[in-house]
Image (cartoon, rainbow, N blue to C red):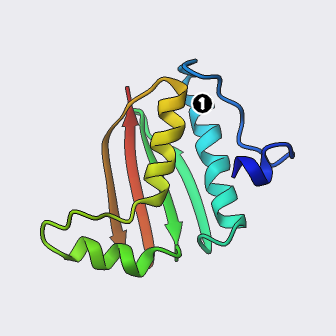
Amino acid sequence: LIETFGDTASAIPKIELGSRPNADKVLAAVKQMVNLFVVSGFAFEGKASIDGKQQFTITFTSPATLWSGQSLKGKNNALLTNDFALKTVKAMMSRAGYDVVNSSVKYANNQEITTFSIV
């Protein structure tokens, strides 16, 4: 995403290494990441939000990984997960100086719902 959109108006807002920005800046970066995933054809639509408890939620409708993610979730004790968006968020938050905790990926109909908190 940085290689393709890094020097454009569509770039993910810059977060300085270890800067631990406030929740509003984190949400802005996550929202733009979701937008770029959609523009790149990863999903039909997507959105990101935060609740009052500082838990972030990313929802993709019809993501490219829907079938494989549902299949892997259906396997008991599956060691593999198809959590591409969560892995991307973890890398972004690590760079910002945060750890991602209480993360989960769930599937409902044609949606992939990722939740996480940062500390």
Picture quadrant where residue 110 is located = bottom left
Picture quadrant where residue 16 is located = top right
Q: In this rendering, is residue 84 above or below 98? A: below
Q: From this viewpoint, is residue 109 visible?
A: no
Query: Residue placed at 37% from the left, 25% from the top?
Result: 119
Left/right placement of residue 69 relative to residue 44 reads left
**Disc 1 element:** helix
Q: Residues within 10 Å of mark 1 (few under 14, many from 20)?
A: few
Type of amino acid under label 1: Asp
User: What residue occupies the far left of the structure in this picture?
Assistant: 76
Question: Which residue is more in the foreground, 99 or 31?
Answer: 99
Q: In this rendering, is residue 112 above or below 114? A: below
Q: From this viewpoint, is residue 81 visible?
A: yes
Instruction: Give how far across and how far down residue 18 sits, in percent.
Output: 54, 19
User: What residue occupies the far right of the structure in this picture?
Assistant: 8
User: What residue occupies the far top of the structure in this picture?
Assistant: 19
Left/right placement of residue 41 relative to residue 54 reads right
Question: Which residue is more in the foreground, 83 or 108?
Answer: 83
Residue annotated with mark 1: 24
Q: In this rendering, is residue 21 above or below 13? A: above
Instruction: Give how far across and how far down residue 11 sits, in percent.
Output: 77, 44
Q: In this rendering, is residue 72 above or below 35? A: below
Query: Residue placed at 58% from the left, 38% from the top?
Result: 27
Left/right placement of residue 66 relative to residue 107 reads right
Query: Residue placed at 57% from the left, 33% from the top?
Result: 26
Picture quadrant where residue 30 is located = top right
